[in-house]
Amino acid sequence: MARHILIAEDDTNILISIEFLLSNAGYRVTTADNGARAWSALQTQVCDLVVLDVMLPVIDGLELCRRIRAADNLNATKILMLSARGRDSEIATGLELGADAYMTKPFGTREFLESVARLLEPA
């Protein structure tokens, strides 16, 4: 069965691009354009990975990361944070909150798909 990925991204162009990439790579994809919709999706679906934009409306990516890590039923879910902010302190904050990886925008297609595959490798 295909791995399930939730993309939480409010920039429509980026969301569509990532959805296209992941679907073409054989993943099952769900999308959300704000943090509240992403959180709601996680209450009803098991996702192997959440691709999480830091700057989301309603519930931001950092708070969503906190919630995912605090939820017992989501502890196996991997988190790849995306942000236009690439300062070391911002990356450190995302990783401290429980993100498994952090990528800064813009990023390369190959680099992104390799990160996703690495995160979804069996332990």
Image (cartoon, rainbow, N blue to C red):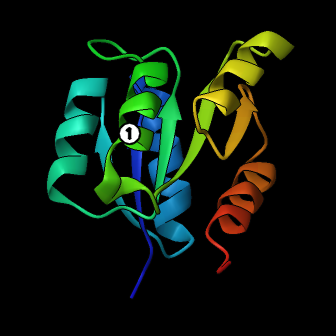
Rendered-image quadrant of the C terminus: bottom right
Q: Residue at x 66, y 62 (%)?
A: 119
Relative vertical location of residue 83 with respect to residue 82 in this rendering, above or below: above
Residue 36 visible somewhere in the drawing: yes
Q: Is residue 56 left or right of residue 123?
A: left
Q: Is residue 66 left or right of residue 98?
A: left
Q: Amino acid at mark 1?
A: Ala
Q: Is residue 112 left or right of residue 23?
A: right
> Mark 1, residues whose alpha carbon is within 10 Å: few (<14), some, or many (≥20)?
few
Residue 87 visible somewhere in the drawing: no
Q: Residue at x 79, y 55 (%)?
A: 110
Rendered-image quadrant of the N terminus: bottom left
Residue lying farthest bottom? Answer: 1
Q: Position of residue 62 (x, y in %)?
A: 49, 21
| Residue assigned mark 1 | 70
Q: Position of residue 101 (x, y in %)?
A: 70, 43
Relative vertical location of residue 104 with respect to residue 50 in this rendering, above or below: above
Relative vertical location of residue 73 with respect to residue 58 in this rendering, above or below: below
Q: Quadrant of residue 69?
A: top left
Q: How many marks?
A: 1
Q: Position of residue 99 (x, y in %)?
A: 61, 39
Q: Residue at x 46, y 65 (%)?
A: 23
Q: Quadrant of residue 38?
A: top left
Front-lying residue, 1 or 64: 64
Q: Secondary structure at mark 1?
A: helix
Front-lying residue, 73 or 105: 73
Q: Position of residue 48 (x, y in %)?
A: 45, 64
Residue lying farthest right? Answer: 88
